[in-house]
Image (cartoon, helix red, strand yellow):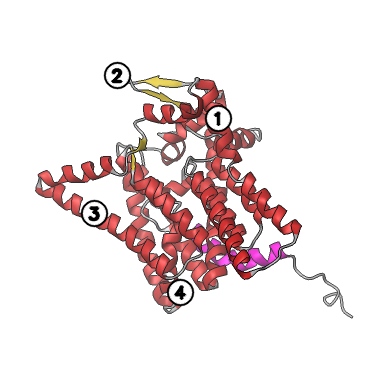
Amino acid sequence: MTDLDQRPPPSRAGHALRRAAPALLVYAGVRALGLAVLAAWGAAAGKSPHTLLTARWDSLWYTRVAEHGYGWEVTLPDGSVHSNLAFFPLLPWLERLVATTGLSHADAGLVVSWVASLCAAAGIFAIADHLYGRRAGICAAALWAVLPVGIVQSMAYSESLFTALAAWSLYAVLRGRWVTAGLLASGAGLTRPVGAAVVAAIWAAAALQVVRERRAGAVRERRADARMLLGVVLAPLGAAGYVLWVGHRTGGGLLGYLDVQAGWGNGFDFGYAFARFVGEKFTSVPGALAGVGLIVGVALVVWLYVLGVRARQPPPLLVYCGIVVVLALCAAGYFGSKPRLLMPAFPLLLPVAVALARLRTSRSALVLGGVAVASAVYGAFWLHGSGPP
């Protein structure tokens, strides 16, 4: 036997990384294009791309939590109070950890976000690859990168971290790895309030599996039942722990976190504020065009979800995606953030990824390349605007 014959077989992790490598390279290339356009735009506008990515809007709030902890708030002229308790703790914790290497907390946030964005792309690839094949997985990761608001994936925001935890938790559910799914869901719950969508997906998957097995008269091993139960129990601990801690700190009890969000003007109003915002656009011709565009955008989101239902996406994906979409569209708050809040709803992209995967490689590359350029330009334009993404 030769030395080559005696080499151990590749590890599962190594095989998975090699399989996902094209998707990660495409994703990294799209994000690099976005950053290059942002840098060129910033040079022309006299603004620092580094500042835009690390030290504006939510990035500043996360950095302050990492540096000084919770308890800082701002009282606005109208009397409303913006408290940093609205920001979940996992990203600031990671910023503080990475900052021990000597980086500033702002730069640490950027590092966490960039690494997390690659992990998110890998998770999206893994799900699409598992369901539809490798080509669809590559297209899905690329589509997530070329979203109009994709520049947020490269900012010191929590969306990339949340999407990474959510995607890998859902992948674990699809593979029947309940404990892993529960742990990752708990991490997602420590990252953003919409972590509840991941918890609901795990609970729905577990309930459906129990129902199916009872109907089939299947007998499961006690260890398998215990693992599923443990995953179900672990999933909500992150979000529940933080919400209860905020309630205790503010004296608001179970509703304490909702009170904090109300200070920011956030809350669930079944889409009334959003509908009113759209309706107000129809008072002028330019505004009416914008209003029509918003309606078309919402219709597109709903249509993509319906396509996922028709394609019989696994129930955990449909539950997760449905809740993310509903919370993004039906919550009161700053309208400009809604596209960003929809970004973790990556199952919406799967029908498009499957369609692109059926095209010739040259055609799908041409489509994705054109959209990537448009996304890069829009991202630079967006970050140079006055309002937060």
Which residue is outermost to the right? 1
Q: Residues within 10 Å of mark 4 (few under 14, many from 20)?
A: many
Question: Mark 4 is on which residue type?
Answer: Ala
Q: Is residue 50 visible?
A: yes
In which quadrant will I find the C terminus? top left
Dot 1 or dot 2, earlier in sequence: 2
Which residue lies under the disc numbered 1?
244
Which mark is nearer the camera, 1 or 2?
A: 1
The first of marks 3 and 1 along the sequence is: 1
Viewer-nearest of discs 3 and 1: 1
Mark 2, residue position:
77
Whether residue 95 appears in magenta in the rendering, the answer is: no
- The alpha-carbon separation of the residues under discs 2 and 4 comes to 53 Å
Closer to the observer: label 3 or label 4? 3
Q: How many marks?
A: 4
Residue at image location 19% in from the left, 54% down from the top: 292
- Per the image, label 3 sits on a secondary structure element best described as helix
Question: Which amino acid, mark 2?
Answer: Pro
Q: CA distance from mark 2 to mark 3?
A: 33 Å
Q: Which residues are magenta?
A: 12-28
Label disc, if present, on residue 357 of the rendered structure? 4
Instruction: Using the image as rendered, state which of residue 252 and residue 5 is in the foreground.
Output: 252
